[in-house]
Amino acid sequence: MKVHEAHQNLARRSRKKRIGRGPGSGNGKFAGKGMNGCQSRSGYAAIRGHEGGQMPIFRRLPKRGFSNARFRTEFQVVNVGDLKAFEADVTVGAAELLAKGLIKKLGEAVKVLGSGELDRALTVRAQKFSKSAAEKIEKAGGKAEVI
């Protein structure tokens, strides 16, 4: 074959390699998979981090540091602008927020953040308020009560 005879579709015409068809197939007695072991078996899928019996690297390395993930408090967030969904002079708690669809579930702590504006007086009861949220609620004539 010469250089000017080569073209793009040449690789597409190569035949599929038929593995596991005996020692006369050109792939050897074991079909190019070696003699024994898990990779020579059908259905083999590598397990992440498995190193063939050697101690995996994530177990060989020392564990350092501290994570606060087990102890942190997860808050459901509501913005001051979202409180426009309520009428004036109403007490807004977790149950009312859930009924309007502003939080996902009861039992978790609620934090009110200061994004948006409020134009009506509301009594808002939550576990936490940002400084700007508490200022905006009180500026509108309402109250921010920490539970």
Image: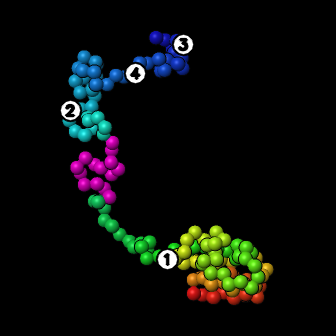
* Magenta highlight range: 45-58
Residue 16 numbered mark, or none: 4
Dot 1 surroundings within 10 Å: few (below 14), some, or many (20 or more)?
Answer: few
The answer to whether any part of residue 131 appears in the image is: no
Of the residues tagged 4 and 3, which is closer to the observer?
4
Q: Is residue 66 above or below residue 39?
A: below
Which residue bears the numbered disc 1?
73
Assign a secondary structure to mark 4.
loop
The CA span between labels 2 and 4 is 23 Å
Q: CA distance from mark 4 to mark 3?
A: 26 Å
Q: Earlier in the sequence, mark 2 or mark 1?
A: 2
**Horizontal and vertical percent position of residue 95:** 60, 77
Give the mark, 3 or 2, whose residue is nearer the N terminus: 3
Which residue corresponds to the image point at 28% horizontal and 59% vertical from the top-left? 60
Left or right placement of residue 94 versus residue 82 in this view: left
Q: Which residue is mark 2?
A: 35
In this view of the protein, which residue sits in the foreground, 39 or 103?
103
> Mark 4 or mark 1: which comes first in sequence?
4
Tell me which residue sits at (49%, 11%) in the image. 2
**Quarter holding residue 132:** bottom right
Nearest to the observer: residue 55 or residue 135: 135
- For marks 3 and 1, give the CA distance: 70 Å
**Label for residue 4?**
3
**Of labels 2 and 1, the one closer to you:** 1
Which type of secondary structure does the marked residue at label 3 adopt? helix
Q: Is residue 51 magenta?
A: yes
Mark 3 / mark 1, whichever is N-terminal: 3
Q: Nearer the viewer, mark 3 or mark 1?
A: 1
